[in-house]
Amino acid sequence: EKKDSAVMKVYPGGLRVSCGYKNIVVNKDTTTEEVILTSLRKFGVEDKDPESFDLIEVLLDKGVAERKVD
């Protein structure tokens, strides 16, 4: 893994596969199409049409903050 790359967790969404997610190594030049194609291959469903899939970014906060509202 190079310094200018990162690992992206890709979840299968509506795909009927037995695993929760796959790690995909990406860099600043990686395209959405490449991520989708690599993901389909890693999930073992490379026969699916990549055009029928979207890559959705989901951001999660670091922990959950609770506040009582008066």
Image: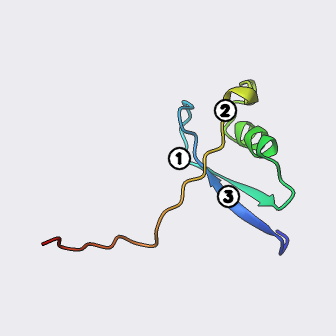
Mark 1 or 3, closer to the camera: 3
Kindly indicate whether the residue at mark 2 contacts the one at mark 3 (C-beta within 8 angstroms). Answer: no
Tag 3 residue = 8
Give coordinates of residue 69: x percent, y percent. 17, 70
Q: Nearer the viewer, residue 24 or 29?
A: 29
List x then y, in percent, for residue 32.
76, 45
Select label 3 or label 2 by which is in front.
2
Which secondary structure lies at badge 3?
strand
How far across and how far down the image is residue 21, in percent? 58, 49
Instruction: Give the residue number, with chain letter if any, for mark 1.
Output: 20
- Dot 1 surroundings within 10 Å: few (below 14), some, or many (20 or more)? few
- Distance from disc 2 to disc 1, alpha carbons, whole Å, reads 17 Å
Query: What secondary structure is marked by label 2?
Result: loop
**Comparing labels 2 and 1, the label whose residue is closer to the camera:** 2
> In the rendered structure, which amino acid carries the disc numbered 3?
Met
Corner quadrant of residue 5:
bottom right
- Residue ranking furthest to the left: 70
What residue is drawn where x is 69% and y is 34%?
Answer: 44
Q: What amino acid is at disc 2?
A: Phe
Can you identify the residue that label 2 sits on? 53
Q: Quadrant of the C terminus?
A: bottom left
Q: Is residue 22 left or right of residue 25?
A: left
Spatial CA distance of label 1 from label 3 is 13 Å
Q: Is residue 26 left or right of residue 56?
A: right
Residue found 78% across the figure and 58% down from its top: 26
Q: Earlier in the sequence, mark 3 or mark 2?
A: 3
**Who's the residue at 66% across and 37% down the image?**
54
